[in-house]
Amino acid sequence: MKYNPIGVIHTPHKEPKGTPIQASGAKEYEGTIELEPKYVKGLKDLAGFSHIILLYHFHKSKQYQLTVKPYMDNEERGVFATRFPARPNSIGLSVVRLNRIHENMLYIQDVDMLDGTPLLDIKPFITEVDNRNASRIGWLENKAHRMSETKSDGRIS
């Protein structure tokens, strides 16, 4: 299996420390996607969506661990029960606001990824399909309301 980036995500976040841990906590941050010119034709009709799903590579993630201490917890958890970036395949996912598209540039908002992040794919966010109410959220039951306020260094915004 081999994936090739289709573009690069540019954001104001230069290092992991202080970066929002979820897109919902990054509403004031804007960024751009510089799409490889050969993929521009694939943007046809995307401008009609207010939000898009980005799949990307955690390019600064260290070697993975199967148990991690999440940013919002003091207890070790299994990596697959977290959104921690040090994962076996280092794949990230964020839902961001699409502000506009100009040629091979996408102007986005709610960016929670680092500058220079390699983009693997773009998918439209469809409220009726993607926005589900989870009936159980595991160890985050009493913490999820803080996710959008927490930075990677543990600070609450």
Image (cartoon, rainbow, N blue to C red):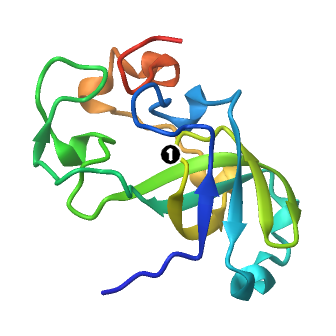
In the figure, 127 relative to 153: above or below?
below
Return the x and y of residue 74 as percentages of the image width and height: 16, 17
Give the position of the N terminus as an image quadrant: bottom left
Left of 103 or right of it: where is 107? left
> Looking at the image, how many numbered discs can be counted on the residues?
1
Return the x and y of residue 92 as percentages of the image width and height: 42, 54
Q: What residue type is labelled 1?
A: Leu
* Closest to the observer, 143 or 76: 76
Left of 44 or right of it: where is 11? left
Q: Which residue lies furthest to the top in this view?
A: 156
In the figure, 63 relative to 5: above or below?
above
* Closest to the observer, 12 or 100: 12
Give the position of the C terminus as an image quadrant: top right
Return the x and y of residue 97 as percentages of the image width and height: 73, 45
Find disc 1 in the rendering and name its residue: 114
Query: What's the residue at 62%, 67% (across, down)?
Result: 122
Left of 79 or right of it: where is 110? right
* Closest to the observer, 76 or 5: 5
Query: What's the residue at 54%, 56% (across, down)?
Result: 116
Query: What's the residue at 44%, 23% (across, down)?
Result: 151
In the figure, 120 relative to 65: above or below?
below
Secondary structure of the residue carrying numbered label 1? loop
Left of 42 or right of it: where is 3? left
